[in-house]
Image (cartoon, helix red, strand yellow):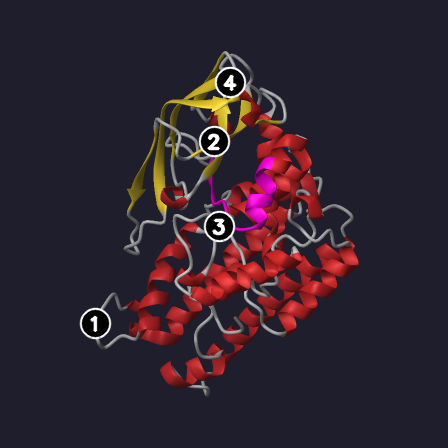
Amino acid sequence: MRVKMRPDEAINGGYKKRSSNPDSEIWLQRMVEQGWTAPNWPKEYGGADLDKNEFVVLLEEMQRINARPPLVGMGVSMIGPTLLEYGTEEQKQRFLPPIAKGEASWCQGYSEPGAGSDLAGLQTKAVLDGDEFVINGSKIWTSSAAFADWMFCLVRTDPQAPKHQGISFFLLSMDSPGVSVKPIRLINGTSPFYQTFFDDVRVPRENLVHRINEGWEVGKRLLQHERSGLAALASADAAGPLERIKPGNDFAEMVNIYASLSDAELRDSWTDNEMIKQALLLTKRRVVEESEAKTPGAATSIFKYIEAEYVKRQLELQLKTRGTQGLGWNGETFSEEDISMGRLWLESKAISIAGGSNEVQLNIISKRVLGLPD
């Protein structure tokens, strides 16, 4: 558990798709026993109830031994922290312990075919029928929908209300009658995304989070948790999502293999690239140490913007270093890493859109962080 983790070794929760490495399961159970899959959650919900200082010490020690994150995914990073703020006590008792134990996997129902960056334009609707809501519509770009047990979902409950009102936040079982998923094949050859369809899906009223028609507030807060990147630190993953774009060899070795260490421009580019990553990670850690809240507010858009640009820049730099070897799709002349990084390079083009486009993040930063006029 102290070596670089392959994507298929990660545990996202639930039992529909588990790790390919049995040691990951042992590691998860040992961390669950300590409450360290969600270390700053209360003990009654599966956490360790660490205060801020204890949390920082845990991060430092886990990173010192290069420990892998025992549990990743939207459960611990997005919906869990959101339920701690907005959920009822019954919802916390019902949903948080299974998340912390890795027993439930979650997906996100936000974007729709006609509502992406303009998320408030969503049209999936829910109508109250007795003690249940009946949901009809569809969501798109639903990551890992085929393997998720639950979805947190924004739907319109009052079509007559102003655009950002009349929206509610629901938790629904992906095994509910009327839920179906269809894979979306990407240019890199994989299908991590799905379109999800709801045909008269019935959701119990107790699965409504916060208040009816006031789900936009909850949805925005969840996005702050996603954009902060602090979940990666909470799982003791020093680089978080940045780790999977790191070459198998260190930078100097990679340059020596594919190019030349005598290339001063290339050396400077790699050095600058590493400095940006370290600055980002240190800033996130400082926020953990300084913030009284669990997650910062609009400043999370800074993390999202910088990280998206860093990932794209790092993969462009890898392509420049590898030359034509970075463009291999298959064949014996290309290494497994050449092919993997080439496909990540293609995939990275979407990272400045996913989770809120760069343009949206810059608007948030200008208005909410810098206080600039409209």
How many neighbours does mark 1 have within 10 angstroms: few (below 14), some (14-19), or many (20 or more)?
few
- Tag 2 and tag 3, C-beta contact below 8 Å: no
Q: Which residues are magenta?
A: 94-109
How many neighbours does mark 3 have within 10 angstroms: few (below 14), some (14-19), or many (20 or more)?
many
The residue that mark 4 highlights is: 157
The residue that mark 3 highlights is: 13
Return the mark for residue 154: none
Question: What element does badge 3 sit on?
Answer: loop
Q: Which residue does the image show at 64% across and 68% down from the upper left? A: 62
Of the image marks 2 and 4, the number of the one nearer the N terminus: 4
Of the image marks 2 and 3, the number of the one nearer the N terminus: 3
Q: Position of residue 191 (x, y in %)?
A: 32, 49
Disc nearest the viewer among 3 and 1: 3
Look at the image and tell me in which quarter the C terminus lies: top right
Q: Position of residue 299 (x, y in %)?
A: 67, 47
Q: Is residue 362 visible?
A: no
Q: Which residue does the image show at 29% across and 73% down from the upper left? A: 324
Q: Position of residue 339 (x, y in %)?
A: 31, 68
Question: What element does badge 4 sit on?
Answer: loop
* Three-letter residue code for mark 2: Leu
* Three-letter residue code for mark 4: Thr
Of the image marks 1 and 4, the number of the one nearer the N terminus: 4
The residue that mark 2 highlights is: 172
Disc nearest the viewer among 2 and 4: 2
- Tag 3 and tag 1, C-beta contact below 8 Å: no
